[in-house]
Image (tube, grey):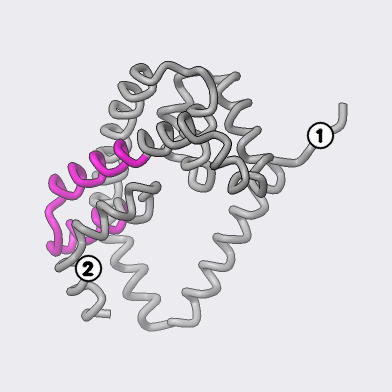
């Protein structure tokens, strides 16, 4: 465990940047906990996560805006999630650009879904950069403040390693159930 933490503190900012290009909720939380442990700097982690997340969502927006026909074959398996992102955009408007950063699982599809519409590019980028800024600050500081209990959980899991797969399977099951319920086709 100590070896993993040392390698994360060595390459942490690079990993954080690359991981937050495509989402990065887990990475910013891990960076906050590592900052609490003294292995990373919290403010640098927040800045790296902010820049990478904003660039990643803007990139997804531009790719889907300019390459709709090439992207659609990859999104066929996610038609219901894409439809959900369109419904969320229609119901909540600009607010969904902020809140999508906190929804694990559809956060990469929403910028792509918005990019396929006629949503203004400049407006998306402004809202995206503002929301990425608040996303990085909120998750960075919350995970830093929750560092002590999270370090306790990691210590507990190092004593009882069989609990880790059980917790991961439970979390994945909850996420799967959530998306199954949210994307069910409802009859009228």
Tell me the quarter of the picture where residue 63 sits. Answer: top left
**Mark positioned earlier in the residue sequence (1 or 2):** 2
Rendered residue at 21%/44% (across/down): 46
> x, y (%) of residue 91?
59, 19
Residue identifier under label 2? 8
Helix, strand or loop for disc 1? loop
Q: Is residue 51 magenta?
A: yes
Q: Residues within 10 Å of mark 2 (few under 14, many from 20)?
A: some
Q: Quadrant of the C terminus?
A: top right
Rendered residue at 29%/26% (across/down): 130
> x, y (%) of residue 29?
31, 53
Question: In the depicted view, which residue is nearer to us: 148 or 116?
Answer: 116
Rendered position, 2 above or below 60: below
Across the whole image, how many numbered discs are drawn on residues?
2
Helix, strand or loop for disc 2? helix
Question: In the depicted view, which residue is nearer to us: 173 or 24?
Answer: 24
Rendered residue at 32%/62% (across/down): 150
Give left or right: position of 178 versus 22. Answer: right
Q: Which disc number belongs to residue 186?
A: 1
> x, y (%) of residue 107?
48, 41
Rendered residue at 28%/40% (across/down): 136
Q: Is residue 115 magenta?
A: no
Magenta-highlighted residues: 29-56
> x, y (%) of residue 134?
29, 32
């Amino acid at each position: 465990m100590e070896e993993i933490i040392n390698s994360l503190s060595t390459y942490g900012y690079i990993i954080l940047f690359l991981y937050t290009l495509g989402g990065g909720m887990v990475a910013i939380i891990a960076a906050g906990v590592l900052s609490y442990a003294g292995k990373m700097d919290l403010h640098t982690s927040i800045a790296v996560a902010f820049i990478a997340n904003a660039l990643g969502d803007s990139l997804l927006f531009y790719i889907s805006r300019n390459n709709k026909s090439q992207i659609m074959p990859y999104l066929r398996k996610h038609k219901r999630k894409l439809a959900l992102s369109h419904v969320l955009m229609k119901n909540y408007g600009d607010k969904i650009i902020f809140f999508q950063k906190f929804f694990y699982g559809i956060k990469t599809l929403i910028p792509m879904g918005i990019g396929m519409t006629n949503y203004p590019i400049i407006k998306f980028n402004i809202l995206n950069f503002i929301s990425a800024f608040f996303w990085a600050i909120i998750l960075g500081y919350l995970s830093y403040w929750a560092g002590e209990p999270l370090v306790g959980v990691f210590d507990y899991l190092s004593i009882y390693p069989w609990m880790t797969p059980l917790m991961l399977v439970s979390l994945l099951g909850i996420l799967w159930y959530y998306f199954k319920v949210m994307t069910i086709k409802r009859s009228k």
